[in-house]
Image: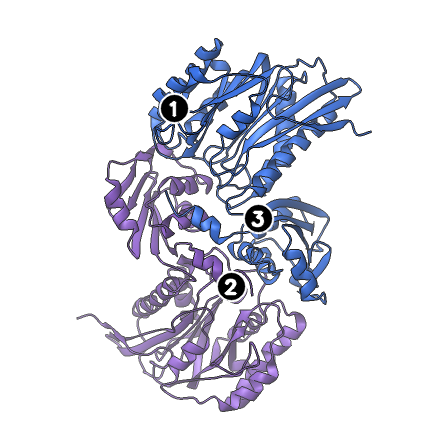
Chain colours: A blue, B purple
C-alpha cells in the first residue's frame, strides 16, 4: 500500500490552517475579482522560505526574508495585481504596512506575518485599498481554493495540491497553492507558493527539506528564461498532527507536492501548447548537464520548433554546442521519447513521421546523451507560441 | 573632407575581385533561385577569418579554419539551402569536395579556397548538384550583388557595403557582403560575411584588425540569443591598390564596413519591427556592462514589450537583476533615447506618452546607468514578434 495519498484541497488540507480571499481593486481600483489572500495557522508554526536570486528583489521578498529568519511564522498575506517591486523605500514601508494590517486583523505580532506580492512592477502598492478590503476577508477551513484563485495573474487555473502521508510515526498532511504563468525560469520566477503542513518538525529541518525540494521542482522549470523579482516559496509547519516524521518521509511528501505544483505552473505557462521534459544524460558533471539542459530549454528557436510540432534536432544540438560545455559532437545521441533522432552526432534512421507523432503530443520528453560521463539533469519547459508574444506585447 | 567615402557595390568594389552566382537546387533539387556564390581575387591574397565559438562547428567552418591558418587564400565558395552541419565525417568530405570543385573551376590549389554554408542543419550536402551548377557560374566585376543574393536564407534583402578610403599613403577600397536573419547572437550567429580589400596588408595585421572589428560589430548583435554552428567572417586582401595603409586607417575603414553590415543584419532579423541599441554605462567593468546588456537584449519579455511599442522598464530592471552582476538597485537610471524612465531605481516623472512615442519608433536606444563605475558596453538588438515565432515554427 502506498503510504502517500492525494487528497483534495491545498493550503487548508493540513489541520489547523484557515484561508480566505477578498477583492480590493489593487490593480485598477475596481474590486471585480479577489486579489488579496490570507493563510493562517491556528497555532504558531515553524517556518522556512526560499526566494528569488535576482539582485533586484521586490520589497515583500525583503520583508519576508527578514521575518522568516526567526524560523517562526503565523500567517502569510498575499496580493496579486501589484508586485511592489522597484518601488524604493516607499515600497519597503508598504510591504511592512501590509504585514501590520494582517497582524492587526489576526491579533498576532507583525513579525509573524510573511508577505508576497505579484503583478505589475514599479507601481506603488495601494495600501489603503488593502486596508479597506482586509476586514471583509472571511477566513475558513474551506477558503484555500479562494486564496489560490486570488493570487492568480495570467494563470488560467488555480493551482492546489495536497497529500496525506502515513508513516511508522503516525500520519501528517501537506498541501499548498502556487501561481506562475510568465517570467518562469530556474531559480524561481514570478512564482509564488505557500505550503502548509501539520507535521511536527523543527525550523532547521524544515529549511533543509525545503531547499532540497525546491532544487528538484521549482528550480527545474523554465517557461521564458526570465527570472522574477518576487519569487517566493514558503513552508509553514504547525505540528498539529502530533506526528514528527522521519526526515526521509517528510522529504518524500514535500517532493511530491512541490513537483506537482511545479508541473502545473509549466502546464499553465503563458500561451503554452506543449510540456517538454528535457533531460541531459551521460554528462561529465551535473553542472554540465544542467548548463546544456537549460540552454536547450531556453532556446527561442528550439521552443518555436516545438510550437510547430517539429521534432527538430539541429537547433537542439546547436544549443548544446553554444552552452559552452566540453562535448564531442560525434558522440551525441538525441531522443524524442524513446525514438532516436540523432545517433553519433548525425541524423538517426528513425522515420520522420514517427518522430513527428511524438512532437505533436501535448507532453513529451527530449533526452540528450553526451556519452561523456554518468551525470544527468532534467528541466521541465514549454514551447514558445505566437500567443505568448501576444500576451506579452506590453501593458 | 572626410577621407572615407561610401561607394556602390560589395565584394567586387575593391580592385581585382570577381564574383558570381548560380542556381543548383541545393535545398529542393529545383534550381529556382541562385544558391551558390563564388568570390575570387585575380591574384593571391592575404587572408584572415573569425568563426563561431559554438562547440558544434559545421564542416565548412572546420575546413575554412584549416585553410585560412596559412594566411593566404584566393577565393571563397558559398552556398545557401544547406548548412552542412551535424553531418559527421561525410560532411567534412563534402566540404572538401566543394573546395576541390571550386579549385578546379578556377584552376588554383584547393588549399586556397575558403568555404561557407548556410541553411538546414543535419542534411547531407548534395555535392553532385554543386558540381553540376558550378560550370554555369559566370564570374564578373559586377557579380557581387548576385553573390550577395545567392547566400540569403530568410533574409529579405541582399546586404552589401563598400567604401573608398583616402590616406596619406594612397587610397584603397574595402567592401563586403553578409547574410543574417535568424540565429543571431553575439559571438556570431548564422551569419556569413565576406570582406575584400585591395589594400596591401600582411596576414598577421589583417588578423588582428579583423578580430577588433568583429568584436565591435558582429559580436554586438543579437536577434534571438541562438548562436549558430556556421558563423564565419572572412577577409581577403590582394594589395592591388598598391596602398599599404597605416593600421589605424585600415581599422577605421574595416570598422565602418563591418558595423554597416552588422546593422543591416539586425534590421533584417526575422520578423523584426524594431532596431534597439542597448547600452549599459556606469558599470564597474566592461564585463559587467556586457553581461547586463546581453541579458536585456536576450530577454524574451523585454523584446515582447518592445514589439508592442511599450516603453517597459520593469522587465529591463528585472533582466539586469538576474544577469547576476553586482548592482545597487536604488542607484539605477534607465533612459529611452534621452528620456528618463527610471531614476534611482524607481519610476521617473517623465510622462508615459513621451516615453511611448520613443518606443513606438522603428529605431531607439535604451541606456541603463548603473552608477557603479565608468565602464560601458552596447549591443544592437531587436524586438520579438509573433511573426518571428511564425517563421520558426519548424520546417
- Quick check: marks 2 and 3 in contact, CB under 8 Å? no
Q: CA distance from mark 2 to mark 3?
A: 28 Å
Residue A381 x %, y %:
58, 46
Front residue of B177/A139: it is A139
Residue A382: assigned label: 3
* Label 2 Cα neighbours within 10 Å, binned few <14 / some 14-19 / many ≥20: many
Q: Quadrant of residue B92?
A: bottom right
Answer above or below: position of A392 versus B166. above
Question: Foreground mark, 2 or 3?
Answer: 3
For label 3, the crowd category at 10 Å Cα-Cα, with few meaning under 14, some 14 to 19 and many 20 or more, is many
Helix, strand or loop at mark 1: helix
Chain under callout 3: A
Residue holding disc 1? A92
Per the image, label 3 sits on a secondary structure element best described as: strand
Image point 41% across, 32% down: which residue?
Answer: A81
Residue B52, labelled with which disc? 2
Q: Residue B307, percent across and down?
A: 37, 52
Residue B176, image x, y percentages: 38, 74
Task: State how far apart marks 1 and 3 are (Cα).
Answer: 34 Å
Q: Position of residue B149 (x, y in %)?
A: 42, 77
| Quadrant holding the C terminus of chain B | bottom right
Amino acid at each position: 500500500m502506498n503510504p502517500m495519498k492525494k487528497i483534495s484541497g491545498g493550503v487548508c488540507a493540513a489541520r489547523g490552517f484557515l484561508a480566505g480571499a477578498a477583492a480590493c481593486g489593487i490593480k485598477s481600483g475596481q474590486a471585480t475579482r479577489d486579489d488579496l489572500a490570507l493563510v493562517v495557522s491556528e497555532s504558531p508554526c515553524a517556518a522556512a522560505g526560499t526566494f528569488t536570486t535576482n539582485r533586484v528583489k521586490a520589497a515583500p521578498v525583503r520583508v519576508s526574508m527578514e521575518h522568516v529568519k526567526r524560523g517562526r511564522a503565523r500567517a502569510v498575506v498575499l496580493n496579486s495585481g501589484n508586485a511592489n517591486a522597484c518601488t524604493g523605500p516607499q515600497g519597503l514601508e508598504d510591504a511592512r504596512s501590509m504585514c501590520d494590517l494582517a497582524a492587526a486583523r489576526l491579533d498576532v505580532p507583525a513579525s509573524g506575518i510573511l508577505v508576497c506580492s505579484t503583478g505589475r512592477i514599479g507601481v506603488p502598492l495601494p495600501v489603503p485599498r488593502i486596508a479597506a478590503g482586509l476586514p471583509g476577508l472571511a477566513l475558513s477551513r474551506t477558503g484555500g481554493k479562494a486564496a489560490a484563485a486570488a493570487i492568480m495573474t495570467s494563470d488560467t487555473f488555480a493551482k492546489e495540491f495536497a497529500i496525506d502521508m502515513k508513516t511508522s510515526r503516525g500520519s501528517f498532511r501537506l498541501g499548498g497553492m502556487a501561481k506562475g504563468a510568465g517570467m518562469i525560469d530556474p531559480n524561481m520566477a514570478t512564482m509564488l507558493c505557500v505550503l502548509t503542513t501539520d507535521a511536527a518538525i523543527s525550523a532547521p529541518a524544515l529549511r533543509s527539506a525545503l531547499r532540497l525540494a525546491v532544487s528538484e521542482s521549482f528550480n527545474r522549470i523554465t517557461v521564458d528564461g526570465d527570472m522574477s523579482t518576487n519569487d517566493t516559496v514558503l513552508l509553514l509547519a504547525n505540528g498539529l498532527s502530533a506526528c514528527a516524521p522521519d526526515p526521509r518521509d517528510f522529504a518524500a511528501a514535500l517532493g511530491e507536492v512541490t513537483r506537482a505544483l511545479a508541473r502545473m505552473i509549466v502546464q499553465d505557462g503563458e500561451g503554452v501548447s506543449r510540456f517538454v521534459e528535457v533531460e541531459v544524460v551521460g554528462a561529465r558533471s551535473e553542472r554540465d548537464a544542467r548548463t546544456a539542459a537549460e540552454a536547450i530549454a531556453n532556446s527561442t528557436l528550439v521552443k518555436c520548433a516545438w510550437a510547430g510540432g517539429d521534432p527538430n534536432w539541429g537547433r537542439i544540438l546547436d544549443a548544446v554546442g553554444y552552452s559552452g560545455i566540453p562535448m564531442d559532437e560525434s558522440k551525441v545521441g538525441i531522443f524524442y521519447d524513446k525514438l532516436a533522432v540523432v545517433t553519433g552526432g548525425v541524423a538517426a534512421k528513425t522515420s520522420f513521421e514517427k518522430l513527428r507523432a511524438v512532437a505533436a503530443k501535448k507532453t513529451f520528453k527530449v533526452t540528450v546523451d553526451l556519452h561523456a560521463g554518468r551525470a544527468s539533469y532534467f528541466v521541465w519547459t514549454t514551447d514558445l507560441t505566437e500567443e505568448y508574444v501576444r500576451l506579452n506585447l506590453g501593458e
